Amino acid sequence: MESVSKSSFIQRLGLFSTIMIVTGSMVGSGIFKDPTDIAAALGIPFWYLLIWVIAGILTLIGALANAEVASIFPKTGGQYIYFKEMYGDTVAFFYGWSIFAVIQTGSIASIAYVFSEYSQTFYTFPRFSVSIEQSFQLYLPFLGTFYPLKEIGLKAVTICVIFFLSGVNILGVKSGSGLQNIFTVAKFLAIGGLVLCAFLFAQNGIPHFQTSSSFLSHTNISFLMGFIVAIQAAFWSYDGWNNITYIAGEVKTPQRTIPKALIIGTITVICIYVLANAAFLYVLPLSTIAKSSLLARDVATVIFGGIGGYLVAAAVMISTFGTTNGTILASARVYQAMAEDGYFFKKMKEIHPRFLTPHYALILQAVWTSMLVMTGTFRTLTNMLIFVTWVYYALGVVGLFILRKKMPNADRPYKVLFYPFLPFIFVIFASVFVVLTLYTDIQMYLEGKVEIINSLYGLFLVATGIPFYFYFRKNKQLT
């Protein structure tokens, strides 16, 4: 049977499903891991909570700006399509390449791996001896030597989860979004239950909200550096809000539904994160949060005792399973849109004649993500690409100003609030954040705190798309 073009996508997703995709793609592993990094970086309860509000408000402004653009171009491919209209094919390609090479595939790998880590609460996976694990090595330039057989049981489960969810999404956007709805609701109930029990059953934790001078004395980085490290972690937790734009062609009345989903979803996640971190702080002092390797488990253990570890492990598995699914569902549509334009592998533009999903793009995404899992580099890569992601976020909002001048009469069912002030504030902050992140990364490298200048390496990874760009452009000109 012949595969069909993307025009055959059917608009099946309503407002509830799109909100579930927005929130489900954002709330994943970050809320259970990033609070530790934020607490260690800042050391002040007030700033520990405020950083979640700041990052949330900035994310919301970015979402508002993208909501207007989404109302103009309600097409599958999301920000790839936006960049093409704003800046042309070159910027659009490198955005899409970054999504494929690291940003989304690294996110899928990282989140699915957390699922596997917490599954060990119920079953310990067998492993090779240390000598066997270390005998098979893989060297990657600038990143060092890695051991694909290390923690092979965890990696095998992670890859199985990735291929299982990719298969579910091949069967249809309704099956993928239906699974997303179930797990998003379940994760919100689990997080809500943990927050409620924290305030009801934990001992009086009001003193935990006061600054501890003894803890501050152990902080060996400047406040500016700590702020950058902390807000990077918070931004990672909020990341994924734009996933819904990738599948705009499969949303009912996308011009109105997607803006509503972005606004409602982002505000919902801000409330969840602030309440969850307030609950964590109510149960544990900030110094304990900063040292915790499994924060949610430690919080649950204080509240429920020994059984708390099992309860929170199940909650984290539900959360990460749903987020992995949402990211897989949305991301493959970008590669499909790129292939339609001739800037990706030709097979990726095909959609399944029966299920009407980009099945080849989903398969390629699963294969590449699994390779990242085997190298074990995905966590390093996602840390690096926060810098690059915010370069693109800044470009996306600058593009809003470009479109206002370039297409003044375009139909805009939604217009960003308080234009041009809110978008301008976002661009200024994003630009300052990018510059300070680069400065902080270089400073930490010079002080020996890190082995890699993350920001520069992130740009290097984007640059790996250069030969592919010229290859695809040459092939496009020949056809």
Image (cartoon, rainbow, N blue to C red):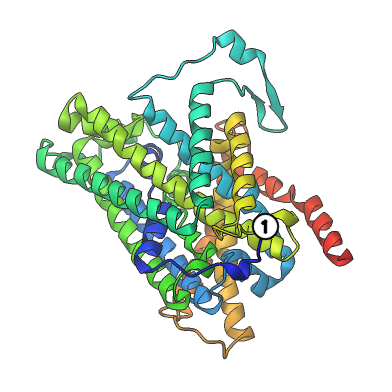
Q: Where is residue 415, by image quadrant?
A: bottom left
Height in image: 324 above or below 397?
A: above
Q: Position of residue 326 (x, y in %)?
A: 45, 52
Height in image: 316 above or below 65?
A: above
Q: Position of residue 209 (x, y in %)?
A: 21, 44
Q: Is residue 364 left or right of residue 251?
A: right
The residue positioned 20% from the left and 23% from the top of the image is: 306
Q: Where is residue 375, by image quadrant?
A: top right
The residue positioned 66% from the left and 43% from the top of the image is: 457
Element on which disc 1 rests: loop
Q: Quadrant of the C terminus?
A: bottom right
Q: Position of residue 267 (x, y in %)?
A: 33, 63
Please name the amino acid that badge 1 sits on. Met
Height in image: 159 above or below 102?
A: above
Q: Position of residue 28 (x, y in %)?
A: 39, 46
Q: Nearer the viewer, residue 31 or 469?
A: 469
Q: Is residue 105 left or right of residue 237?
A: right
Classify 10 Å Cα crowding around label 1: few (below 14), some (14-19), many (20 and above): few
The residue positioned 59% from the left and 69% from the top of the image is: 8
Q: Nearer the viewer, residue 202 or 180?
A: 180
Q: Residue furthest bottom?
A: 409
Q: Where is mark 1, residue-wise? A: 1
The residue positioned 54% from the left and 49% from the top of the image is: 386
Residue 50 seen anywhere in this rendered image of the structure = yes
Q: Is residue 420 left or right of residue 50?
A: right
Residue 236 seen anywhere in this rendered image of the structure = no
Q: Residue furthest front?
A: 1
